Image (cartoon, helix red, strand yellow):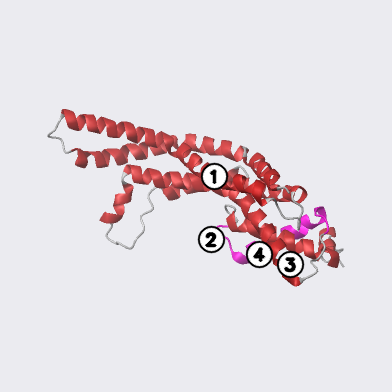
């Protein structure tokens, strides 16, 4: 008969059941928002099994938590642990989402959003270049091990924010709300090269339309804007990938900074 591993023996111990539930809730919150882990194509059964296995592996490093005296007091600690996991996942999700948001902005600037009006199937969604930007961000994220960085950050959070002790909402609220500002800042940084090129193109077309009034600027600007936008987008992909890599290098420090603000 094979011996039972230490982490399974710890998980099956009755005094560790409350902390096991809390760790599972924290990992479950991470799985709801973290890139790749929250992907729709990721099977739910595999995600649930992975959550339980990770909770059992992290259980020996977590302190023992006493069971609440009343059952009605149990949902609040579970919700707090899930909120902590959601915040850790959002720290990386805003970076990946920002690159996709930059693709949406560039599609509008280039005029690709008008493609839906010319589509033979009106119900068909025309996403533009946003999926390509999202795939680029996801590939860089996985290549640099961003999904593993989140798991390491969650394991470190068990020492900074022990399960069952809650978090400081007043101190952590500014750090969490700053994620929305970081989202738009990263999106503008990713879209800046193409936006500058399109701005110069529009200025040149405006000057050309004044110099040659017989030129139909509206008919000429559409193919020129789309062509220059696609060329600049292809040329800026290495720059965007390098910028995103720099953001990913600062992800562990960002998670630690956010956990310190949430610490009671």
SS category of the residue bearing label 3? helix
At a point 77% along the width and 48% down the height, the residue shown is 159
Which of the two discs, 3 and 4, sits closer to the camera? 3
- The kind of secondary structure the magenta stretch mainly shows is helix
- The answer to the question of whether label 4 and label 1 lie on touching residues, with beta carbons closer than 8 A, is no
Between the residue at mark 3 and the residue at mark 4, the CA separation in whole angstroms equals 25 Å
Residue 47 position, x and y percent, is 63, 62
Figure check: 232 above or below 53: above
Residue at the farthest bottom position: 71
Upstream in sequence: badge 4 or badge 1: 4
Q: Residues within 10 Å of mark 3 (few under 14, many from 20)?
A: few
According to the picture, the residue beneath numbered tag 4 turns out to be: 48
Upstream in sequence: badge 2 or badge 4: 2
Upstream in sequence: badge 2 or badge 3: 2
Q: Residues within 10 Å of mark 1 (few under 14, many from 20)?
A: many
According to the picture, the residue beneath numbered tag 2 turns out to be: 40
Between the residue at mark 3 and the residue at mark 1, the CA separation in whole angstroms equals 36 Å
The magenta segment is 38-64
Which of the two discs, 2 and 1, sits closer to the camera? 1
According to the picture, the residue beneath numbered tag 1 turns out to be: 95
According to the picture, the residue beneath numbered tag 3 turns out to be: 73
Between the residue at mark 2 and the residue at mark 4, the CA separation in whole angstroms equals 13 Å
Upstream in sequence: badge 3 or badge 4: 4
At a point 84% along the width and 67% down the height, the residue shown is 14
């Amino acid at each position: 008969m094979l011996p039972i591993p230490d982490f399974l023996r710890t998980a099956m111990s009755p005094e560790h059941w409350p902390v096991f539930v809390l760790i599972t809730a924290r990992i479950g919150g991470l799985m709801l928002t973290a890139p790749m882990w929250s992907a729709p194509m990721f099977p739910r059964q595999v995600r649930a099994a992975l959550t339980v296995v990770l909770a059992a592996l992290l259980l020996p490093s977590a302190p023992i938590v006493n069971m609440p005296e009343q059952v009605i007091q149990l949902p609040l600690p579970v919700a707090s642990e899930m909120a902590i996991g959601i915040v850790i996942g959002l720290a990386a999700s805003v970076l990946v989402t920002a690159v996709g948001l930059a693709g949406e902005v560039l599609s509008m600037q280039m005029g690709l959003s008008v493609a839906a009006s010319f589509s033979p199937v009106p119900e068909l969604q025309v996403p533009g270049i946003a999926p390509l930007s999202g795939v680029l961000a996801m590939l860089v994220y996985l290549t640099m091990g961003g999904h593993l960085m989140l798991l390491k950050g969650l394991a470190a959070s068990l020492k900074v924010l022990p399960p069952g002790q809650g978090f400081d909402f007043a101190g952590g609220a500014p750090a969490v709300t700053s994620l929305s500002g970081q989202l738009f800042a990263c999106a503008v940084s990713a879209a800046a090269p193409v936006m500058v090129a399109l701005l110069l193109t529009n200025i040149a077309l405006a000057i050309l339309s004044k110099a040659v009034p017989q030129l139909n600027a509206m008919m000429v600007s559409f193919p020129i804007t789309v062509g220059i936008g696609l060329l600049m987008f292809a040329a800026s992909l290495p720059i965007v990938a390098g910028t995103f890599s720099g953001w990913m290098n600062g992800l562990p420090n960002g998670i630690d900074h956010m956990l310190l603000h949430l610490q009671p």
